[in-house]
Image: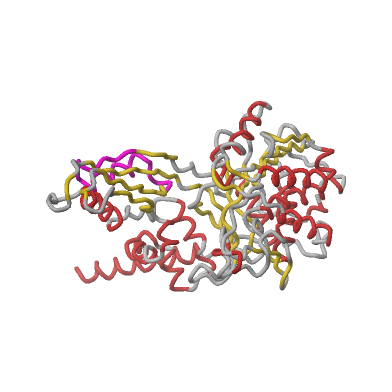
Amino acid sequence: MIKRVILAALLLFMIILVVRTVYLSRRSVPAKECKASDTDFIPLSQPRLQRFQQALRFRSISEERGVFNADQLQKLGDFLIASFPLVHAQSEWERVNNYSFLYHIKGSNPSLKPYLLMSHLDVVPVTNLDKWDAPPFSGDVHDNFIYGRGAIDVKQCVMGILEATEYVLASGVRPVRSFYIAFGHDEEIHGHEGANRLAQRLREKGVTELEFVSDEGLPVSEGIIAGITGPVASVGVSEKGFVMLKLSVDAPPGHSSMPPRESTIGILARAVHKLESNPHPSVLGQGIETDMFQALVPQMSIPHRVILSNIWIFEPVLSWFLSLNPTTAAMIRTVTSVTIFKAGVKNNVIPPHAEAIVNHRIHPSQTVKEVIEYDRALIADDRVKIEVDSMMEAHPAAGYGEEDFGYQVLKTTVGQIWPKAIVVPGIMIGNTDTKYYLPFTHNVYRFSPTHMFPGDPERFHGINERISVKNYEQVINFYYHLIRNSDQAGVSPTHPPHHEF
């Protein structure tokens, strides 16, 4: 009798595994690919390429808050105004706080909620000049790649949005749904003077609600995620929060010839060691990353499909495996980075004070309070003072279901440009300017139409930043189709070519 029960349970278990694997292996209906022969395809003409190259030549560098290249930002802005005459003649636009830009393209149906396309004009500084294959502010083309700081972060989006909008206006088509375009000038230094002021300006103009927001974010990746057989377009539907904690220990100073049993350095080092040795627990199975992994199932080999289709049973093993890699570990938990450690005043003096900065990037399934409570319980030493230096809660999750308009429009648009890509929800592990626009909508999507292959992620903020000529053409077409697809009043599973509207 017992054997029969065990066999029946095993059989039921196997049936559940198989059913879930088959169910999640289904592929969604693909959108119709936009081909070069289609009337709604925008070719990368020489003038369009040259405009992008010129945009890369402006050294619009942000160093730190209040320290940026104002002259180059001014010239870049003047260049944009001159390069896109229809955008600047047929839309309401203004420079905000001297260097940022806000545009309003009015649609024919004011009853539809507008949306917002975002990007930023500034770039990070350049290092290791001697290791670049082309000067970082040249915009030179080598082997069908366009080189330059900002090529993938994110002047390609700035120029792609403007090229697409100019094309729409030149075609004589008035968008049905109104939309805004916002380009901040200091995203790399937290957007206090750019995106923050742009959001304030939107409120002053009477905007209270947006249908969705699209900003830079996760790319189309290929050959980067282990076990995946094709391209994956990850759309960031949330963004990690953060908390910077200052840990400090104080004690009376003393002479090194008569040391106490424990020094401030030793006490603090032990606390830091506990934090590094005991990472925050995996939340796999609780949040967005679970839906992301399960959405990847159709692109995976059979063994991977079985495991990811049944996270409910394989969670402990899968969490352990994902924790071996820093990138995948960051997807499933709050991470801990000790970034600063200070102590000591003289080589023969017992230091009276020691402090460290601990940088936590907070998973959307947790709160700042929970993270601090975990650290406090783990350290379990009242001599270690814990203070909050700065913090931001994780962003609320945007909708990514079948009825969520913004996500489905992005998903369909990706399918038109990258027909072989599977679109999955993801978590943005870095931070963007989108925090300033959360009061207008929780439907904030972080996606960059950049096609990345092995070795490309290291170019982000790194050496030899570049984008292929073909990919830049895809960027322009992505934003054109996103604008046209957003003209619908509601969600539909696929979109016809725009010349059939």
Q: Nearer the viewer, residue 107 or 499?
A: 107
Left or right: residue 332 compared with residue 228: left
Which quadrant holds residue 91?
A: top right
State whether residue 53 is above or below residue 165. below
For the point 72% across and 61% down, the residue is: 139
Quadrant in which the N terminus is drawn: bottom left
What x and y, as percent, mark residue 303? 43, 73
Left or right: residue 229 compared with residue 1: right
Count of numbered labels shown in the rendering? 0
State whether residue 304 is above or below residue 281. below
Q: Which residues are magenta?
A: 363-387
Q: Nearer the viewer, residue 231 or 111?
A: 231
- Give the color scheme: rainbow, by chain, secondary structure or one colour: secondary structure
What x and y, as percent, mark residue 154? 64, 53
For the point 57% across and 64% down, the residue is: 128
For the point 72% across and 32% down, the residue is: 111
In the rendered image, is residue 336 in sight? no
Left or right: residue 254 compared with residue 439: left
Which quadrant holds residue 369?
A: top left
Please tell me whether residue 366 belongs to the stretch shown in magenta.
Answer: yes
What x and y, as percent, mark residue 106? 77, 36
Q: Nearer the viewer, residue 221 or 258?
A: 258
What x and y, as percent, mark residue 143? 71, 73
In the rendered image, is residue 302 in sight? yes
